[in-house]
Image: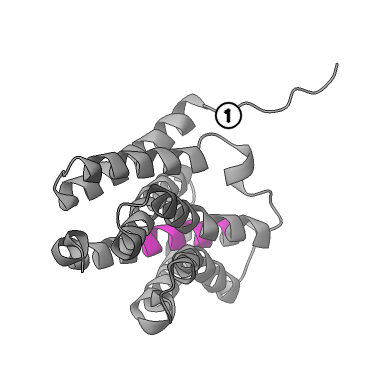
Amino acid sequence: MTELSQSVSTLILALDLFGTMAFAVTGAFKAIEHKADIVGIIILATITGVVGGTIRDVLIGHFPPHSISNPLYVVITVSTGVAIFFLYPKIQKHWNLFLKFDALGLGVFTIIGATFAYDVFGLNFLAMTLAGMLTAVGGGILRDMFVNEIPIVFVKELYASASFVGVLAFFILLSVNVEPNIATFVGIAITTVHRLVAMKYNWNLPKVREKL
């Protein structure tokens, strides 16, 4: 067991559950926008909340995935879906809530995915990047596809790139022996802030220029 798994295992579980809730909120909002009923809201909240982590666990060889072995994950997504169903009339004007939860979920899931990979493979940048980014974007991609939208990660602002920057910062901090708790929170903060700033200033990656 590595230093990271020894020192922050409880923190990692708490953050993973929080990230699940944050992404479940985005799934519930998206479902309501597309006129889904309460069952559809719960399903999309659950898909958005657990798919990224499930992909991560399959990638690093953890069976069964945490979303199946630990019922708290599904309890959180279902509870979140029900809560948003009832609260939506009061919060529907607060679109920024959706965007902030999406950014925070991106930050949390990016670093959580990277830490799980580190726990299995050690300081392996490729494994940490794949696990972190797949954890962060997997649920959001399916969320958007289920409502027949092009996934936001492919078309708008800095999303996957923000996740990559967060993993890179986390990797560098661990490489220079920064205390794991600090590296975790710094990585989450960098990813989240990167995403929020990109949304505020409408930063986008280059796209193909159409012929005039």
Residue located at (44% from left, 57% from top) = 131
Tell me the magenta residue range: 19-30
Query: Considering only vertical position in the picture, is 47 above or below 209?
Result: below
Residue located at (29% from left, 44% from top) = 170
Residue underneath mark 1: 205
The picture places residue 141, in percent across and down from the top left corner, at: 59, 55
Residue located at (16% from left, 60% from top) = 3
The residue at the far right in this view is 212
Place residue 33 in its image quadrant: bottom right
Q: Is residue 33 visible?
A: no
Q: Nearer the viewer, residue 48 or 4?
A: 4
Query: Considering only vertical position in the picture, is 23 above or below 179?
Result: below
The picture places residue 186, in percent across and down from the top left corner, at: 24, 42
Decide if residue 9 is on the left or right side of residue 160. Answer: left
The picture places residue 115, in percent across and down from the top left corner, at: 31, 57
- Label 1 neighbour load within 10 Å: few <14, some 14-19, many 20+: few
Q: Is residue 81 visible?
A: yes
Query: Considering only vertical position in the picture, is 187 above or below 24?
Result: above
Q: Nearer the viewer, residue 103 or 168?
A: 168
The residue at the far top in this view is 212
Q: Which amino acid does the dot numbered 1 rest on?
A: Leu
Query: Considering only vertical position in the picture, is 25 above or below 63?
Result: above
